[in-house]
């Protein structure tokens, strides 16, 4: 018999029971569906020790790295401390240490969060205002011991939260920050695998962190970044990424502009996903990261899969563009 600890309550798992069986028997509210590891409705996470390998069948490498598992497949071999994904979200206080403009409508926001000990570039957090207004933003930098999180915030028309961040927040202000979430980040296994990164607008934020993380960890396979915007002035960090491409022989950068006029010579005409599709020839074995407008992400995810990319090697972060 093993013990399951959930939100400071302890339950005893019988020898023939799964984690899901035990929690349902004890009346714990946990989503579930097929009970066979197919629907992933009962996705759960351990807070300390990794779960049994068989309970992670069918999950992405990034989910396995964060100790996610399927409760319906898990026969505990030892006591487990578990967090259900529908439990109340935990926030900690962060302090703004930098806010400066990256271009005419995109803010670089840096928040120091001492209570956040572990995160991956490309994950996202929820930022919360004092009145409870909450929005999600992707982490744009690699992990730092100081607990500094970097975000790229685009000012959106009628966007309550982005307008507040642009116009009112100052260095020294406090902002509530949730625990990091999401599975769109780099895992160092298969260092010779090709990495394709396609993003629009501030979809560059998670991709920039993933890119830096991969190259700093010695990724040896080809890495290609296609970043697009409707106008040249909406792109940002162009010179930094060009310098990155000069520093790393295996990295190629393609700034893309979808408008048909006033395109600088160093930019590529066309939408980022369309340029990437035209550029790529052999897709099999590649790992793909897609971040930005939901329509682009959905379309490119389908295209990459049809071109031969394994679904488990496609990582997405689709931005909700309204009411930010």
Image: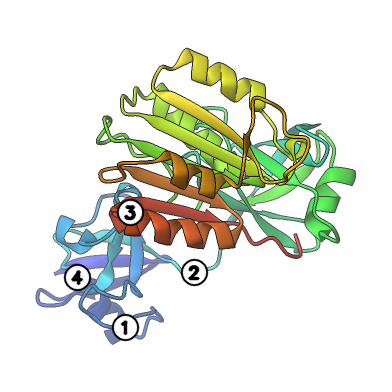
Reading the image, the residue beneath label 2 is 87
Gap in angstroms between the C-alphas marked 4 and 2: 21 Å
- Identify the disc placed on residue 33: 1
Q: Determine the residue positioned at 50% across, 38% down.
A: 121
Task: Decide: few, some or many residues near mark 4? Use Cα within 10 Å; few <14, some 14-19, many ≥20.
Answer: many
Determine the image quadrant of residue 88. Answer: bottom right
* Residue depth check, mark 4 versus mark 2: number of the one nearer the observer: 4
Q: Earlier in the sequence, mark 4 or mark 3?
A: 4
Left/right of residue 130 with respect to residue 309 in the rendered view: right
Identify the residue at the far top of this view: 247
Task: Decide: few, some or many residues near mark 1? Use Cα within 10 Å; few <14, some 14-19, many ≥20.
Answer: few
- Identify the disc placed on residue 251: none
Residue 179 visible to an observer of this rendering: no
Q: Determine the residue positioned at 55% across, 32% down.
A: 254
Task: Decide: few, some or many residues near mark 2? Use Cα within 10 Å; few <14, some 14-19, many ≥20.
Answer: few
Q: Determine the residue positioned at 52% across, 35% down.
A: 209
Q: Determine whether label 2 and label 1 are within 8 Å by CB.
A: no
Gap in angstroms between the C-alphas marked 2 and 3: 38 Å
Residue 256 visible to an observer of this rendering: yes
Reading the image, the residue beneath label 4 is 73
Q: Is residue 298 above or below residue 313?
A: below
Q: Determine whether label 4 and label 3 are within 8 Å by CB.
A: no
x, y percent for residue 75: 15, 68
Q: Earlier in the sequence, mark 2 or mark 3?
A: 2
Reading the image, the residue beneath label 3 is 307
* Residue depth check, mark 4 versus mark 3: number of the one nearer the observer: 3
* Residue depth check, mark 3 versus mark 1: number of the one nearer the observer: 3
Say which element carries label 2: loop
Q: Earlier in the sequence, mark 2 or mark 1?
A: 1
* Residue depth check, mark 1 versus mark 4: number of the one nearer the observer: 1
Q: Earlier in the sequence, mark 1 or mark 4?
A: 1
């Amino acid at each position: 018999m093993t013990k399951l600890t959930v939100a400071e309550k302890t339950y005893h798992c019988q020898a023939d029971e799964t984690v899901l069986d035990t929690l349902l028997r004890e009346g714990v509210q946990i989503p579930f569906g097929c009970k066979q590891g197919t629907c992933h409705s009962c996705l759960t996470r351990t807070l300390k020790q990794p779960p049994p390998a068989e309970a992670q069948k069918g999950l992405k490498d990034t989910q396995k790295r964060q100790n996610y598992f399927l409760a319906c497949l898990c026969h505990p071999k030892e006591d487990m401390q578990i967090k259900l994904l529908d439990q109340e979200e935990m926030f900690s206080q962060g302090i703004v240490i930098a806010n400066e403009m990256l271009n005419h409508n995109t803010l670089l926001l840096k928040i120091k969060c001492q209570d956040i000990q572990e995160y991956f570039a490309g994950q996202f957090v929820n930022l919360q205002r004092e009145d409870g207004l909450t929005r999600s933003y992707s982490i744009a930098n690699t992990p730092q011991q100081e607990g500094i999180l970097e975000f790229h915030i685009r000012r959106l028309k009628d966007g309550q939260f982005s307008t507040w961040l642009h116009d009112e927040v100052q260095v020294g202000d406090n902002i509530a920050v949730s625990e990091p979430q999401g599975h769109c980040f780099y895992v160092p296994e298969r260092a010779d695998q090709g990495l394709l990164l396609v993003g629009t607008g501030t979809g560059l934020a998670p991709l920039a962190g993933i890119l830096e993380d991969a190259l700093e960890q010695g990724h040896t396979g080809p890495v290609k970044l296609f970043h697009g915007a409707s106008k040249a002035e909406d792109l940002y960090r162009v010179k930094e990424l060009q310098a990155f491409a000069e520093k790393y022989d295996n990295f190629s950068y393609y700034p893309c502009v979808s408008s048909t006029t006033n395109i600088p010579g160093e930019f590529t005409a066309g939408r980022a996903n369309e340029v990437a599709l035209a550029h790529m020839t052999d897709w099999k074995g590649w790992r793909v990261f897609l971040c930005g407008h939901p329509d682009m992400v959905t379309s490119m995810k389908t295209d990459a899969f049809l071109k031969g990319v394994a679904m488990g090697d496609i990582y997405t972060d689709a931005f909700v563009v309204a009411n930010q």
